[in-house]
Image (cartoon, rainbow, N blue to C red):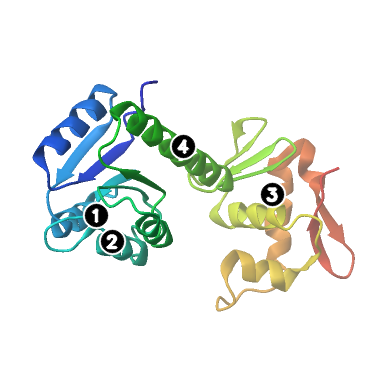
Amino acid sequence: MATATMTQRILIIEDEPDITEVLKYNLEKNHYQVATAGTGEAGLAAAQQSLPDLVILDLMLPGIDGLEVCRKLREDPRTRDLFIIMLTAKGTEADVVVGLTLGADDYIVKPFSTTELMARIKAVLRRVETRESEAAEKDLQRCGPICIDLQKHVASLDDTPLELTLSEFKLLSFLIRKKGRVFTRDQLLDAVVGPDVFVTARNIDVHVAALRKKLGKVGGFIVTVRGVGYRFEES
């Protein structure tokens, strides 16, 4: 099995110590970070506190059972997107359907093959990497040689960071996101400074002029629409 990245954290919620030790040993051997809990209450608290990438959840737990733990995790906005593999001796078709209906991502019946379990864990965690990659991509706006990283709050031109004011950054980000559409000066001001701030509509002309200058060769991407306002259009 390929080595997992150190950012992948797994929480085992299981009340049988022997099974917990086998799982923990094999997971740590494959370079996962592992935490354990022996009851439903402890597991729920651990998941809410540490937000692991994956929860391996036994169904027959003392106190809150695994189905209830799964339901509570899916109801909580902070934990609803955690990946969950249910691990249980209850293997009827009806049990599987209930588990998957409550939001389990996979369902493995005891006794299980360690090799199969590791393969299933790896398959689920690949989805974590895909989701993180998609989330990172959503934070990036690109248009020609311009790239805006919303998370880092950095705009660059040909991979060279631009020195923009906050208003210029907001304006450029808004125009790229809505490229091709025409906006009045008032609409652009609302997007940049908000509707409750009193400034004149002509202030947007100052921001546009400064932004065009800083964008240099692609400053013409910000097009003046006579009598209306501006639009962003890649030449």
Figure quadrant of residue 230 = bottom right
Residue 149: x and y, percent? 55, 43
The x, y position of residue 78, in whole percent, is 34, 60
Q: How far apart are marks 3 and 2 (CA)?
A: 55 Å
Q: Residue at x 60, y 56 (%)?
A: 170
Q: Are marks 1 and 2 in contact (CB under 8 Å)?
A: yes
Which amino acid type corresponds to the residue marked 3 in the rendered image?
A: Leu
Is 106 left or right of 152, judged from the image as shown? left
Query: Mark 2 and mark 4: span between their CA atoms?
Result: 26 Å
Residue at label 1?
A: 59
SS at circle 4:
helix
Quadrant position of the C terminus in the picture: top right
Which is in the foreground here, disc 3 or disc 4?
Answer: 4
Q: How far apart are marks 4 and 1 (CA)?
A: 27 Å
Can residue 235 be seen? Answer: yes
Residue depth check, mark 4 versus mark 1: number of the one nearer the observer? 1
Residue 17: horizontal and vertical position, in percent? 9, 40
The alpha-carbon separation of the residues under discs 1 and 2 comes to: 6 Å
Q: Is mark 2 on a helix, strand or loop?
A: helix
Return the mark for residue 112: none
Residue beneath disc 3? 211
Q: Which amino acid does label 1 sit on?
A: Leu
Q: Residues within 10 Å of mark 3 (few under 14, many from 20)?
A: many
Callout in the foreground (3, 1): 1
Which secondary structure lies at badge 1?
Answer: loop
Q: Is residue 226 above or below residue 179?
A: below
- Amino acid type at circle 4 is Glu
Callout 1 environment at 10 Å: few (<14), some (14 to 19), or many (20+)?
many
